[in-house]
Image: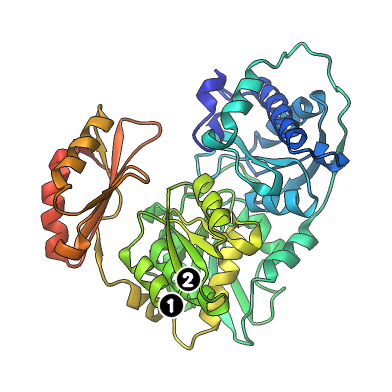
Amino acid sequence: MLGKVFKAYDVREKYPDPLSEKLAWKIGQGTCTYLLGEAEAAGETDPMMRNIVVARDMRPHSPSLLKALVEGITDAGGNVIDIGLVDTPMTYFAVNHLDCAGAVMTTASHNPIEYNGFKISKRKARPVGQPTGLQDVLKFSAIAKPDKPKHGGGRVEQRDLWQAYAKHVLAFLDLKGKSLKVVIDASNGMAGTMIPNIFGTTGEHVPGLTIVPLYFENDKGTFVHQPNPLVEANLRDLRDKVLAEKADLGICFDGDADRCMVVDENARIVPCDLLTALIATWMLKKNPGSAIIYDLRSSKAVEETIRKHGGKPVRGKVGHVFMKAELLEQQGVFGGELSGHFYFRDNFNADSGAIAFATVLSVLADHDAPMSKLIEPFARYRQSGEMNFHVEDKDAVMVEVAAAFEERGEIDELDGVSIDCFAKEGWWANIRKSNTEPVLRLNLEARDEATLKARLDEITPMLGELVAH
């Protein structure tokens, strides 16, 4: 049962079957054993290294799962600092602000309401995924004994960090005396708690900012739309409201507010790779020559823009575990993913929906043009979007596709198979495996529509059956 709830980057499944309070207790034990072991192996002797930050989202089963998790942690000898009902990025702030051994957020992010789970971070908010410790957490959780005597010595305390967290986030915001109007769709998720605490429900904490709130209520145990801003249908109400309010911008957050999507003043969706390019220009003006990390599925325009502005472009593997590690290793200033995760050096190399929002506002305020005009120069190529194909032998198909194009362009296997024929033929593609399904994911970009269509007609028959959205 435990193996079913452990995914590539976190713990996540339906509640209460298979993810139950009993499993939450075991996961608390396993997490504590792992995090305290990591601190000990690093030679950390400070008593704070026995402290683990915990928090939860607004799901109706989050309180009981968190309670069981906390009991598991304290039974294993760890101390708990509970920071309450918060967005996931606040746990990254807390573990650094309090200098603790790690943190656990009870959340299922953008999944439907019947799901829940745990996102685990270690010291310095470094992520715990399959390649970075999650397998050890699973191993320690599996051997935890539920008949062990309760309350093994760890203590629990509650802390309110909103004031310190707001100060941290608002350090990224500079409206330069301008006035901006923004519609925010909180998706009935944790942005409905985070935005009022940092910016004010209607922007009252920030001079010049007006916020029009949508779906800030998060205590009913329901979603008006699924809290996944990557699905275009979930942005319909936001887009309508931006037009009705004549707003400068619209922002939609996911369930735990670590991701966000932007729509411009014309209610057009701003692709996250193009937003990465725009933010990169602003970051490089402030941090000349810095590395910028970008998801390898991103438009060629991202790499070209970073180079044009004197930065170091670094292609990253998909997933927050890899992006954060790359940002740290390259000493980069900023990173962006197609999924709406944006990473900041000055936020402990971690992602944050709140800081992404503040940064987008700052970039917009730094120009005398609307968002549509700022994005327009980067939208110079044609993209397929991510297309999914059902195929049983994923590895064999990827080998075949790579072999078919090896004489036409450059092939690399940083993450799946990337084929770069841009210099000669004006296109490139990336094909990646799903971690959980017999599915291959294709992203293809070309200089023009005709090349895009021709290459899709050539490649897609190799990949299996197209899965409808």
When the figure is inspected, residue 385 is found, relative to residue 107, above or below; the finding is below
Q: Nearer the viewer, residue 280 or 43?
A: 43
Q: Residue at x 86, y 23 (%)?
A: 151
- The numbered disc on residue 193 is none
Q: Which residue is mark 1?
A: 309
Q: Are marks 2 and 1 in contact (CB under 8 Å)?
A: yes
Q: Nearer the viewer, residue 9 or 417?
A: 417
- The numbered disc on residue 280 is 2
Q: Residue at x 83, y 18 (%)?
A: 150
Kindly identify the amino acid type of the residue bearing the numbered disc 2: Ala
Q: Earlier in the sequence, mark 2 or mark 1?
A: 2
Tell me residue 333's x, y (percent).
Answer: 56, 65
- Number of residues whose C-alpha sits closer than 10 Å to that of mark 2, classed few (under 14), some (14–19) or many (20 or more): many
The quarter of the picture where the C terminus appears is top left
Kindly identify the amino acid type of the residue bearing the numbered disc 1: His
Q: Secondary structure at mark 2?
A: helix
- Is residue 5 visible to us here? yes
Q: Residue at x 65, y 44 (%)?
A: 57
Tell me residue 337's x, y (percent).
Answer: 45, 56
Tell me residue 167's x, y (percent).
Answer: 75, 67
